[in-house]
Amino acid sequence: MRLEGKTAFITGGNSGIGLAAARTFVAEGARVAITGRNRETLEAAKAELGDRLLAIRADSKDVASIDEAVTRAVRAFGKLDVVFANAGIAAVTPVGGTTLAEFEDVVRTDLTGVFFTVQSAAPHLNEKASIILTGSVHAVLGTAGWAAYAGSKGAVRSMTRVLASEFAPRGIRVNQLTPGATRSPIWNAFAPDAGAMEALERELIATIPLGRMGEAEEIAKAALFLASDDSSFITAAEIVVDGGATGAPRGRVEIPPAPTGGLRLRQG
């Protein structure tokens, strides 16, 4: 088991990618503390994963709440080997239709909360620990209406490299995990019923060369790689798990075969 004897702290670990990572880490031998704001989903995660999981109600926008969550995790499990700063929210914030409060809510959760999660955990990290920050393909896509979210995730992308430099003297690695369109509760606000969700998925899938949405478990497997010693010489890096959406932005393109006797190129 790749995380045997290790301890992990995951923000936003009560649903979606964070919960999938918690399941994967526990299955690989880790003791895991998760945070979240929803008491019911935290209790469900605890019931599912048992004594190897500590579920803590905390808000990543509240620095004092983050500090307390880290303290509780360390008190329960000891110093940390993995920090997965994963908590985040998504919101459409178009120019001319966004309040200051809406914009700041995204930034405080997706950028400020990530930094202070790392800062709170820093004194409690073992040597050669792994810090993983959750980014997003929106940092590079330029999708209209997503300024606050894309700006926050772009900042996280830059911050990953800065933190990697700062933690390097302790042998601690800092990397970014960048999911593409992944089935998770983050989409519920944009598709309130099954029909709307199906239409949204069709729209997203049209931009993905592999022709499907990602699954939270697939992102969790990439997080496991970054958390484990398998990635011991990787830092300041970004692993993109998006089905090719950013690397091949034209999406799924079928190229017809060349006609018989068609034009051919010859070398020499």
Image (cartoon, rainbow, N blue to C red):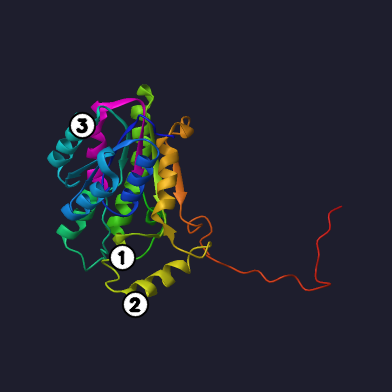
In the picture as drawn, the residue positioned furthest to the bottom comes out as: 195
Local SS, label 3: helix
- Image-based side of 102 in relation to 31, left or right: left
Q: Which residue occupies 32% across, 46% down?
A: 155
Residue 146 visible in the current orientation: no
Say above or below: 248 vs 173.
Answer: below
In this figure, which residue is indicated by the disc labeled 2?
A: 195
Q: How far apart, in angstroms, are the residues tagged by discs 1 and 3?
A: 42 Å
Image coordinates of residue 95 in percent, x first then y, are 26, 65
Q: Nearer the viewer, residue 192 or 268?
A: 192
Q: Amino acid at mark 1?
A: Gly
Mark 1 — residue?
Answer: 145
The amino acid on which the numbered mark 3 sits, given as a three-letter code, is Ala
What is the CA distance from the residue labelled 3 to the residue labelled 2?
44 Å
Amino acid carrying mark 2 in the image: Gly
Q: Residues within 10 Å of mark 1 (few under 14, many from 20)?
A: some
Res. 208 visible in picture:
yes
Question: What residue is pinned by disc 3?
Answer: 76
**Mark 3 or mark 2: whose residue is earlier in sequence:** 3
Q: Are marks 3 and 2 in contact (CB under 8 Å)?
A: no
Q: In front here: 109 or 155? A: 109
Q: Label 2: few (<14), some or many (≥20) within 10 Å?
A: few
Name the magenta segment's main secondary structure: helix
User: To which quarter of the image does residue 198 belong?
Assistant: bottom left
Q: Which residues are magenta?
A: 110-133
Q: Quadrant of the N terminus?
A: top left
Q: Is residue 216 above or below residue 63?
A: below
| Residue pictured at 77% horizontal, 73% vertical | 259
* Mark 2: secondary structure: helix
Asked which secondary structure carries label 1, the reply is loop
